[in-house]
Structure formats: C-alpha cells, structure tokens
Image (cartoon, coloured by chain):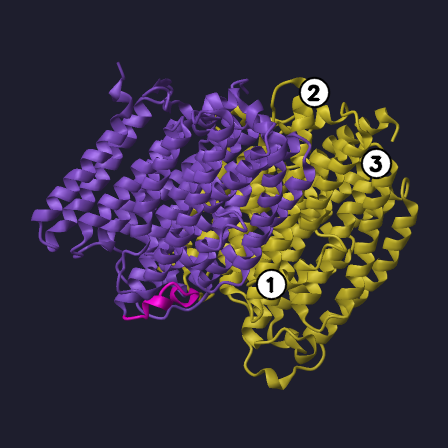
Chain colours: A yellow, B purple
Amino acid sequence: MLPILSLIVLIPILFSAVTFLTKTKEQARISALVGTLITLVLTLYMYFSFDSTTAAMQFEEMANWIPSLGISYHLGVDGVSMPLILLNAIVIPLLIVYTWDDVRSAPNRFYGLILAMQGAVIGVFVSLDFFIFYIFWELTLVPLFFMVNIWGGSNKKHAAIKFFIYTHVASLVMLLGIFGLYFNAWSLTGSPNMDMAHLISQFQFFESGILRDAIFLALLFGFIVKLPVVPFHSWLPDAYSEAPTAGSVLFILLKIGGYGLFRVMLPMLPFTATPSLMITIMGALGAVSILYGAFLALAQKDLKRMIAYSSISHMGYVTLGCAGLVSLSVSGAMFQQFSHGLIMSILFMSCGVIQTSTGTRIINDLGGLAQKMPKLTVIMVLGFMASLGLPGLTGFIAEFLVLTFSFINVPIYVIIALLAIVITAAYHLWALQRAMFGTFNEKLGEIVDISSYQTLSMGIIALLVLYFGLNPSPVLDMMITNSEKIVSLMAVMGV
Amino acid sequence: MVDLMLLAPEITLLVTGLTVLLLGLFLSAQSKKILGYIATLGCLVAFALTLNSFGTTAVMFSNSLSIDALSQFFKLVFLTVATLVSIASIKYTDGNDHADEYYVLVLFATIGMMMVASANDLMVLFVAFELASLATYGLAGFEKKNPASTEAAMKYFMIGSLSAALLLLGIGYVYGATGTTNIPEVAQNIGLLASSPMGILSLVLLIAGFGFKIALVPFHMWAPDTYQGAPSVVSALLAAGSKKMGFVAAFKVFITGLIALQADWQMAFAILAVITMTYGNIVALSQTSVKRMLAYSSLAQAGYISIAFVVMTPMALTGGILYALSHGFMKAGAFIATAAVVYMATSENKDILKADHLDSFKGLGKRMPITALCLTIFVMALAGIPPTAGFMSKFVLFSSTIESGLVWLAVIAILNSALSLYYYARVVRYMYAMPAEGERVSEPAPYVVALLLAVVGVLAIGFWPEPFVNMAMEAAKVLIPGGI
C-alpha cells in the first residue's frame, strides 16, 4: 500500500526545496501550487477512505529509526488529526491562489517557506512517536520566523524574535515533560521507547504523584502557549499582526497546541494525582481567555490586531471544551479548531486586501468600503458572522457544543464565557459597521475590489464555512468517535 | 611486536606534513596551491584508516598509548575538523608564500590532538598537548601584518604557557603521590593521592590546565580575543578541534585516572559548567562581531559538554562525546562560513578588523546564497533546532540529566539553550531580512566544498543518528567499562 502519510509530509517539503531553487515568480508559484495540489489530492483520497466509525489509528506506518534510544518512525491518523490535516491541505493551496497576484520580493523563498510550513504542520499531526512529533513541532517555528522577519510589518523584528523565543521556551519545557515521561517509562519497563501511546499508557504507573502532576503541567504549558491562552498569549498579537497575510494564515493553521491537548493531555488527565485541579486550571484558563481576549479585541483600533485578539478569545473554547470532559464538549473543542482555521483565514485575507488597497488597517480611517468593494464585503461579512457565532455557520456549531456540554461539569466557567458572547458580537459588528458600511471615506482615494484569484480562494473557504456550518457531520462524526474513546477512559477512572 | 598499523593515521599525517614541508622548498608561491590538496588528501586517508580500524583495542609502547573506541572516536573528530579546515584553507592561503608552513602546522596540530586522544600516560599526554598547542600558537598569529592576529597569538601563547605550567605541576603532584604517570596505574594507586594534601592541589591544577584548553570560565579570558583575532579558518581549528582535545584529555584523566576523587571534581565541574554556559550565552548576546559571538557561544557549548562530567552516567558520556563530534561539524562550519564572508569583505577593501562585523552579513542570503544557507543550518544546529546534529546531541545529553534526577541542571541548560537562540537568530535575520549592500559575489569553491561537507555531517547526525550514537556509546564504554 502507498505510504500516504509519509507522502503528504514529504511532498510539501520536497516541493519547498524545488520552489527555493526556482528563478522566476512564475515558476515559484506554479511549483508551490503543484506541490500543494498533489498533497490535497492525496489528503482527499485519504479522507474519503477514512473510517470514521473507529477510534483506532489508520494508515499507520512504522519503521525503526534509532533503536538504541527506542525512537521509531511511527505515523498514523485518527479522527483527532484527520480534520486538521484536511484543513491544512485545503487552505494552503487556496492561500497560494490568494497571493497569486501579490507582488512580493523573493517569491521563491516566500512560497518555499509556505510549503515547508505545510510539511512541518502535517508532520506534527501524523507523528505517533514523541521524538518526531517534537522535531516537526520545532520545525514549524523556522518558516514562521522567516515569514514574519522578511515580509512582516514595521515592527517585524521584534515580533519575530518574541514569537520565536516565547514559543521555543514553551517547547523546551514541553521537552522536559517528554523526558520525564520517557525516563520513567524506561525505568518501569526496562527498555527505552518514545512511542506516544506507549508513554501515555505507562504514565499511570509512575509512583510519585508530584512527578505525574509536574510532567502533566510541563506538557500542558508547552501546548497552551502555542494555543495560546491568557496569560501566555502576549507573543500572539504581535506575531499575528506583524506577519504578512500569508504568514497570519499560516499561524492560524498552526493548530498544534490544541491538537496536543486532545492527543496527549486528555488521555493523561485521569492519571494525574489531582485531576480536579488540572480540570480547574484548564477550565479557568479557557474561560478567562474567552472573556479577556474579547475585551482586548473590543479595545483595538487596528483591524488586524482586533482579529488577532479575537483569536485568543476563540481559542479559549478549545481549552474550555477539554475541561468540559464530556464527549460532545471535547468534540466541540476539536470542531472549534477546524472552524477557527477556516474563519480566521477569511478574516486575515480580508484584512490583507483592505490593507493593500487602502494602505491602512486603522478601523476609524476606513469607512464605507462596501460601496467600492462589494465582493469583499459579502465574503467578509460571512466571515465575521461565522466568527461571532451566527447559527448556520461553523463557528456556531463549535461554540454551541462547547458551551452546552461543558455546562454539565464546569458550569461556572461556562457562565463566564457566556458573558463574552455579547462582547464578541459587539466588537465584530462595530468593526464591520465602522469599516465597511456608512459613508465612504473620500481620503482613501481610488479603491478597487478584490482580484479574481482572491475572490476564488476566499469564496471557496467561505463556502466551506457555510457547508460545514449546515452539515458538520463529515468531520464532526470522526471527532465524536474519538472523543468518546478519550472520555470513556476518564469515566473508568471516575473523573 | 608493536602493531604500527594502528598508528597508520598519525604516520600518514606525519608523512603528509613532511612532504608538504619538502615541496614548499621548491614551489613558487603561486604553485603552492597544490599543498592544500595534498594536506586534504592526507587527512582523508588518515580518516579512512581510523574508521577502518574502529573497534580495535590495543596498548603499545609500555602501555603509554592506548588505541580504543574512545581515542578513535576523537581521532575521527579531529580528522573531520582538519579536513574541513584544510579544504577551506585552499582559498585562504592562495598565493601566500608561507602556505607550506601553514599546512604543516595544521597537520602537526592534528597529530598532537590525535596523540592526546590515545595517550595512556600523563607525560605522553602532556607532550602531545604541547605539540598541538605550539602548532596552534603559530597558526593564530599567521597573519603577521594583522595586529589582531598578532595579539591573538600573543595572548593565546602567554596564557597557554601558563596553563601548561600549571598542568605540568599538577601532573608532578600526581606522580609525587602515586609514583607513576601511567593513567590506569594512577587509578590503582589513587589512595595514596587521596590521602595526601597533594590530592586537592593536583585536582585544582589539572582542572585549571584543562579548563584553559576547554575554555571554561574563568579560564576563558584568551578565547574571545584569540578566536576573533586569528584567521577565521584557524578559529575553526581552535574552537572545533583543540577544544575537543581538552575534553578527551579531561575525560581520560578525571574519569579513568581520578575516578576515586569523583566527589571532589564533580562539584567543581558542576559549578564551572553552569557558570560557563550562562556567562557565555549572556555575553554572546551583546556581540556585534560574529567571530566574537561564535567564540562566546563556544564557551556556552563547552559548558553543555561539561555536563557529562557532572552526570557521569553512560548516557551522559555518550551525549558529551556525541556533542563533541556534532560541535566539530557545527562550529567548524560556522567559522568557515564566517571565513568566506571575511574573505568577501576584505576583497571589497573593507577594514580587516571590521570584516566579521554583523554588517558584513547584511543581505548575505542574496549575495552569497550557499554560504548563507549553510551558516543558517549551522547556527540553527548550534541553537539545538531539530533535525540537526545539535538537537540530537543536546537531546541525549540533556535527557541524561533528567534520567539521573538532576532536573535543576536540565532546566538551567535548557533555559540557556533558549537564550542562545536570540543571538543565533540575529545572524540569520541579518542575512535574510536586511537589504544587501552590494551585488551577488561568486563564492570561492573551497569554502563551498568545506561548508557543504559540514552541512552533510550536521544533517547526517540529525537524520540518521543511530551509527553515531552507537559509536559514541562504544567510546563511552571505554570510560565506564560497566557498559550501557
């Protein structure tokens, strides 16, 4: 059988190298598009032959890599990772279409980095060995660092370094946690093994309760900084808003933090010494992020910064859903990751269009753009409505599931989060009203609507938001199958 | 009958050195270019011979030389560095009338380092140590007309001589107490040393002596000036090669010879390791000269490797030894890339003293794409970003501290590693995010070849670590015979 998982990781990386070597813009974008389209075709093939009724790993690949340290090349997908791979495989080719006409310096490097990023992110989602998981995890830093640093805004150096160091430190703390898991399992079983499932299954046998909690918290820290949640979010607004549009979208597709919560944290949770404390931590962080992120978004003058802060608010639902600890709240959190990737792509792309055509992102300097940019307005309004959780769009499904079903176990945090819904609606509508509607601000000069390439790519994503909003089951079913498995483990432990 | 075949690598280098010296008498400055190729060939043959005999164990010359996995592993490290340096020097010495002397010194320094790796006797070790040191003193001052190079050599020589004296005194005390200079015999008679006041004194002197070569804080004062002032290719030899000589000597003397005094020296190494990595990283943050930055980062890296002495488990030693090899590739590569930039800057009439300033690296991604890409890989490896040799070695080394329960040490090392990312990333930022001040230049072939070889090494250890880890484990078993 075809080693399909290796292929969807290697093809983007291979095409990234090819793209780096191209000479003209034409060659660079064609090479990039070809690479991502092959990945998309393979991913779609995988998606359609995926069995969403089982929580078991599918398309597994396994080979020895460093036997003396128990490290193997172990790949596989299940309902936790499949939707996120699908998200990346769909949005990244559209991102390349979106930037088709954008004149940029060094297009070969620009597209090369996008492809390298795709390979690294998919690599994280398919890794079942902690060692390669960590390698791909760290690799995702490099393209984004360059992306922000080379093509970013006026404050790009600061933002790039801040992002790099902040999340690198978090990764290293996570690595400490992995070491802890690894060596304790080594001393228990007598042989080294870096396999994720093995290490997580051995976790329950560690004698010291303090050690178990420390390992859990170290890993949790690594994941929630990447997610991010308040108070570890401060790298995000700078990085998201300084990055070029493509970079912001790549940041959005970097769903590895939340993924870690489902893949590693939830299965480990019942075996910590103080599960209720851990749930409290996760629930509180989630609720605070939702509310605080919304307040911060309300206060922003810069459209892109507002979207960046709204992202913190939305990511809070992922943590809250995890803390909810029932299968549907966890599925909601998973769905939030998927939906957020689509919605935020539209929002950042819209913001990029506005900046290129008007030269500003300050909300008060805009106004009445709807008259000049009808096509953009339609797509953007859809994106904003999805982002504030209008029923019929993906954002609603995710938030509804999280809020409704988390109420069973963590009602207080849900009540806190509910307050944010009003604020979320307020800043979205307020921004939209000031920027897009009302009288046209004549100072902005000649404005042209979005190009056909951008209409195409943003339109497709908008349709997906609508489609999965009306019919979430193609991805939600596989999420539910897996969250049921995760949660049933907790029920056994009486958490 | 001594099996001289086991000394074939050293003999090869010796014969190559003498050939270079002899040919130098007859060749004109222009045709001395060929000497670089001869030296490279010699190093490659010696490398092949060493690799071929890896795993053979023997003692010779009244037990004063020992050929084992440890010595052979380090010989491979030294020969790797010497090969890279010889290749890169072909451009550097082009048209220089003293090219013959240059290559002889490189080759003899390498022989010295290799003898240190095989030394089984403190006196042999000292003599080999000095052979390597004297040759590198000369190399550091090779640019006689460049005041920085002269200063580098002078500082290196003065402090080097002092440390040699301290080392010799330390050896003298060990001999005085135990009645032998043979390292295994010292270990047997260690009780005599431990019970006498000379014990602590000799430890202090030996740590100071080796600490100088390893450039542990506070014995590091010479390193930044010397690495900065010396020709960049020579800095590569110093940082990647002669520093490892200090490590293998310290491994042998402390772990094989003075293991009974472990409690005393282990604490000293713990303190020195922490101070060295922290100090090196913090000072490196503010450097604007890339060579000086690499010098301080080299201190930090020495601090990491010293963790092996503190943890002292087979895994830690494996990590330390693997780190030595990885650092050989990474650091030699980084200095050679800097050498290529300095070459470009000086050929554009830039002041030699400022040629390695960060400004010379502006827009290097456009001006010298291969050099810039290779340097990016080296600094990312030095920072420990996977999948490179740097990550692999740090992984084994740092994880060994967790394994033995020294979580505080792992935390300090990891925080340091994160800190280092800042100044490494700055170089990358200058290369790719700053506009170029000049046109694209053609990159000299010797530098490119050396850089690509080093990149292959860095990535090979990152992607396919199994054989390297196994070799390092074999080497570690020599130090701790108990096995892994």
Q: Position of residue B362 (x, y in %)?
A: 41, 66
Residue B119: image quadrant is top left
Up/down of A48 relative to A32, above or below: above
Compare marks 2 and 3 and give the one earlier in the sequence: 2
Task: In the rendered structure, find residue A159 and report the number of the disc placed on it.
Answer: 1
* Residue at left offset 15%, top offset 56%: B97
Residue B51: image quadrant is top left
Q: Which residues are magenta?
A: B349-360
- Mark 1: amino acid: Ala
Say which of marks 1 and 3 sits in front: 1
Q: Position of residue B27 (x, y in %)?
A: 9, 49
Give the chain of mark 1.
A
Say if mark 1 contacts mark 2, CB within 8 Å.
Answer: no
Circle 1 packing at 10 Å, graded few (<14), some (14-19), many (20+), is: many
Disc 2 is placed on an element classified as: helix
The residue lying furthest to the top in this view is B1
The residue that disc 3 covers is: A326
Distance Cα–Cα, label 1 vs label 2: 43 Å
Give the chain of mark 3.
A
Q: Are marks 1 and 2 on the same chain?
A: yes
Q: Position of residue B157 (x, y in %)?
A: 37, 52
Is B358 magenta? The answer is yes
